[in-house]
Image (cartoon, rainbow, N blue to C red):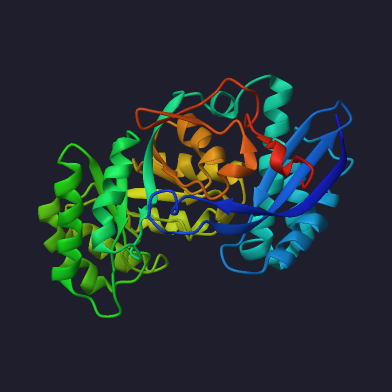
């Protein structure tokens, strides 16, 4: 089997993740770079990538240049194909635009691999379970006022989520009282049976994270996410050692090596993996295995239509982040039942581009 054609396109996808829960919010439109890869046996693999800020055109150009190098290659020899692409990128092959573009190509190759085998990726990659807990993420953003927060929390509860998070680090000046008040408000609404986490987005210093984290213990958080800079492995370790609340980080790690450094330093209780930042499914699975060797569970960051399969495949998969940033782009996204992603038996990713975007991709 050989790859005979590739096609890269940019499409604008409405993201209703926040607007669906917050009154008066407008949908955000995201530019998404799509990839379709076809083989001489009629199989098609799809992948996507995007940059949350700008730089969409450079990403599309990088992906197109790399994808064209796969034509004529055997798509089932995934490590061989990606090694060729890394060689082409030379000294730029460890992070940034190359890694994000590679993630879409690697994902498309695995899609073909799954379709050839007639198996969904969650089963092909390990098959530990067919459903994984989803945690609601994004609706309780720090930009949502406390007045709206109660409405949003009830909306999340009504959808059956058992895991959810809110964003803290609310202002330029850290106010422990303000942070605790917001977290306590949500806890009172959702009850003690809900596993509640909070995301700091690397906005606190080590000292602030420890001081506020201790104040937040009364709320009973299930995790504290990205409390300080992700590349401050020693600082994260100090926070992890000081707090009983599990610390989660890793979404901004590029490739395998930062996870090795993070795990060796004892920086995290939970490792968070971003498919695009690590360069695709092949690397994602390696990082999960590395984390398992340190007895650390893993969680996915965004793109649940792809990554829920990966969390389900590995023995240390804990939960998958639920964000519908690219949800409208696809048919076949995982069903959510009682707060879990339930994965299908469709081969590969089990996804296809939705009719609204089929002609654009």
Image spot of residue 101 (x, y percent): 69, 55
Image x and y of residue 67, in percent: 80, 50
Residue 224 visible in this rendered orientation of the protein: no
Position of 178 compared to 260: left or right?
Answer: left
Q: Residue at x 74, y 64 (%)?
A: 90
Residue 297 seen in the current view: yes
Q: Nearer the viewer, residue 268 or 155?
A: 155
Taking the view exactly as shown, the residue that stands out farthest to the left is 218
135 and 4: which is toward the camera: 135
Furthest residue toward front: 24
Quarter location, residue 129: top left
- Residue 283, image x and y in percent? 58, 46
Indicate the position of residue 290 as horizontal and vertical percent values: 45, 44
Q: Is residue 19 left or right of residue 242?
A: right
Tell whether 322 sits left or right of 210.
right
State the residue at coordinates (53%, 53%).
256
Pick the front one: 30 or 222? 30
Quarter of the image where the N terminus is located: top right
Number of marks in the rendered image: 0
Picture residue at 27% right of the left edge, 56% below the top: 149
Residue 56 vertical placement versus 337 (above, below): below
- Up/down of 216 relative to 4, above or below: below
């Amino acid at each position: 089997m050989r790859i005979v054609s590739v096609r890269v396109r940019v499409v604008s996808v409405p993201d209703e993740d926040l607007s669906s829960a917050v009154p008066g919010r407008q949908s955000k439109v995201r530019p998404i770079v799509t990839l379709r890869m076809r083989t001489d046996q009629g199989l098609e693999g799809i992948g996507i990538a995007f940059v949350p800020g700008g730089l969409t055109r450079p990403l599309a150009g990088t992906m197109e240049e790399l994808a064209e190098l796969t034509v004529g290659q055997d798509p089932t020899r995934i490590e061989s194909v990606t090694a060729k692409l890394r060689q082409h990128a030379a000294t730029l092959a460890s992070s940034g635009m190359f890694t994000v573009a590679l993630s879409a190509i690697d994902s498309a190759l695995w899609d073909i691999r799954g379709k050839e085998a007639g198996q969904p990726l969650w089963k092909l990659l390990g098959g530990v379970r067919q459903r994984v807990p989803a945690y609601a993420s994004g609706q309780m953003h720090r930009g949502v006022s406390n007045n709206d927060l109660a409405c949003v929390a009830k909306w999340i509860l009504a959808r059956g989520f058992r895991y959810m998070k809110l964003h803290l680090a609310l202002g330029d000046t850290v106010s422990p009282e303000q942070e605790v008040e917001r977290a306590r408000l949500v806890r009172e609404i959702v009850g003690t049976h809900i596993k509640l986490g909070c995301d700091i987005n690397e906005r606190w210093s080590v000292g602030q994270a420890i001081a506020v984290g201790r104040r937040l213990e009364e709320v009973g958080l299930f995790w504290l996410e990205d409390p300080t800079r992700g590349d401050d492995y020693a600082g994260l370790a100090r926070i992890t050692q000081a707090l009983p609340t599990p610390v989660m980080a890793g979404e901004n790690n590029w490739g395998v090596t930062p996870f090795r450094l993070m795990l060796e330093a004892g920086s995290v209780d939970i490792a968070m993996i971003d498919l695009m930042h690590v360069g695709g499914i092949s690397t994602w699975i390696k990082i999960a295995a590395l984390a398992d060797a340190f007895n650390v569970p893993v969680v996915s960051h965004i793109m649940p239509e792809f990554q829920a399969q990966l969390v389900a495949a590995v023995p240390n998969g804990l939960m998958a982040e639920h964000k519908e940033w690219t949800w409208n782009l696809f048919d076949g996204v995982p069903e959510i039942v009682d707060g879990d992603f339930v994965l299908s038996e469709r081969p590969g990713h089990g996804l296809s581009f939705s009719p609204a975007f089929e002609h654009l991709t």
